[in-house]
Image: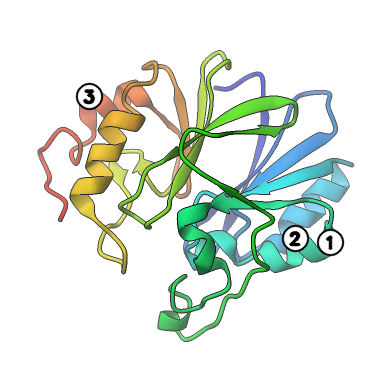
Amino acid sequence: MAKELQIDIVVSEPFAENSYIVNRPGDKKCFVIDPGFDPEEIIRRIHERQLELEVILLTHGHADHIAGCAAMKEEFPSAPLVIGAGDANMLTDPLANLSALGGMEVISPPADILLQHGQTVKAIDLMWEVREIPGHSPGHIVYIWHEGEPPVVFGGDVLFQGSVGRADFPGGDGPLLIKGIKTKLYDLPEDTVVFPGHGEPTTVGIEKETNPFTTGRVRIY
């Protein structure tokens, strides 16, 4: 899947969160999606492969997706930190990013760039469309590369293989999440590959047909 991209996945504990290092084969420019609790491994792989980090893209502001931001910015200070405007406050607020609820305090540097629904962001010389899909967090966004064969989505905690993101956190909204998936992901081609924040990749077509939450077999509140 996604043969036009080289995608290196770092799974960080304790939440088995997927951080992605993305480049084009033969090109040293890369970006990172959602650096979690293992930034040292992300940094090690970038240096080992002699890659050049352009930008750090965040899908949302929960602690397991931003825990590595401070270390990444310290190592790569010229790489801008990017997040949806609706989740920007979560970077610097341990209560908002839920880390304080777990007895820790995750604090990220503030964002360098804030994105809105419908904007595009350039990374590794490709244009990624930004779509806001709230419900798991208030300002959750996804990044879509339409020109890929197949198209590619980095979807954070919106849509998983056979599941969807939790909606019982502060700021969550289950019906809004399901509506967003149906209107802002399920309109993509069925072979679109979704790289989620947890678990294995899936496709839009598979989830449209079989996902119990979006087909209505399981109700989310």
> Residue 193: x, y in percent?
47, 26
Specify whether 36 is left or right of 169.
Answer: right
Q: Which residue is mark 2?
A: 72
Left or right, 96 with respect to 161, comes to right
Q: Position of residue 132 (x, y in %)?
A: 42, 42
Question: Which amino acid lies under the numbered mark 3 shown in the image of this protein?
Answer: Glu
Residue pictured at 15% horizontal, 32% vertical: 215
Query: Circle 1 is placed at which residue position?
Result: 75
On-image quarter of the C terminus: bottom left
Give the CA distance from mark 1 to mark 2.
5 Å
Task: Rate crowding at label 3 as few (under 14), some (14 to 19) or many (20 or more) other CA atoms within 10 Å.
Answer: few
Label 2 to label 3, Cα distance in Å? 38 Å
Mark 1 in CB contact with mark 2 (< 8 angstroms): yes
The residue that disc 3 covers is 209
Residue that appears at 18% across and 48% down: 175
Q: Residue at x 11, y 37 (%)?
A: 216
Question: Given the image, on which type of amino acid does mark 1 rest?
Answer: Glu
The residue positioned farthest toward the bottom in the image shown: 103
- Examine the image and state in which quarter residue 55 appears: top right
Callout 3 touching callout 1 (CB < 8 Å)? no
Q: Earlier in the sequence, mark 3 or mark 1?
A: 1
**Quick check: can you spot residue 32?**
yes
**Tag 2: residue type?**
Met
Tell me residue 1's x, y (percent): 54, 22
